[in-house]
Image (cartoon, rainbow, N blue to C red):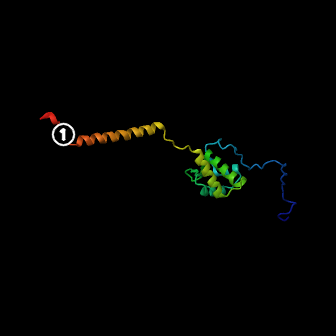
Amino acid sequence: MRRGSKEGSKQTRRKPRPPGDAPLATRKTAQDPESKLYRSISEVSDMLRVKAHVLRYWETQFSMLRPKKNRAGNRMYRPEEVRLLIRIKELLYDRRFTIAGARRTLLDERKQDEPQVELGFNEAERRMLVAELKAEMRALLAKLKQPAVAPAGSR
């Protein structure tokens, strides 16, 4: 009997999977960015349906995207970074922005979100009062440094 002949060897055939049935090796990740404190790059790439090298490239192009790395050097994405990646993907893939355009849009959005520091009236009033006090004290010090003049009727 020869090897490879069908007579002496058992060959098993897999049954075809029904349509819509997912393969067992498919990872199931929660689609909610808030559901976990940290996610690995593979989880995020599965969630966004982009390859890991794309995420690493985006990291070089978008300065606001800086995932932490664990002791082994693996990237760990926080929920706010996952939300940022979702926004980047939307700008690049859905709205067809260039990388430069997406970067500019994200920076403009970030500037709008940050509240401007406003000097309150109390702070301004306090600074004016301090300036006035300093001026008055300098004037008093100048008067004290002048030589004393005797009154005219004292002799």
Please, what is the three-letter code of the amino acid marked with disc 1?
Val
Q: Image height check: is 123 above or below 86? A: above
Q: Nearer the viewer, residue 139 or 97?
A: 139
Q: Image height check: is 109 above or below 121? A: below
In percent of width and height, residue 58 lies at: 63, 56
Q: Residue furthest right?
A: 7
Q: Say what secondary structure mark 1 lies in.
A: loop
In percent of width and height, residue 21 lies at: 81, 47
Q: Nearer the viewer, residue 41 or 63?
A: 63
- Residue placed at 65% from the left, 57% from the top? 99
- Left or right: 145 with respect to 74? left
Q: Image height check: is 18 above or below 2? A: above
- Residue placed at 69% from the left, 48% from the top? 47
- Residue placed at 42% from the left, 37% from the top? 126
Give the quadrant of the N terminus.
bottom right
Give the quadrant of the C terminus.
top left
In percent of width and height, residue 125 lies at: 43, 37
Q: Residues within 10 Å of mark 1 (few under 14, many from 20)?
A: few
Q: Residue furthest left?
A: 155
Q: Residue furthest bottom?
A: 2
- Left or right: 127 with respect to 39? left
Q: Nearer the viewer, residue 53 or 124?
A: 124
Residue occupied by mark 1: 149
Q: Nearer the viewer, residue 155 or 98?
A: 155
- Res 153 quadrant in image: top left
- Res 92 quadrant in image: bottom right
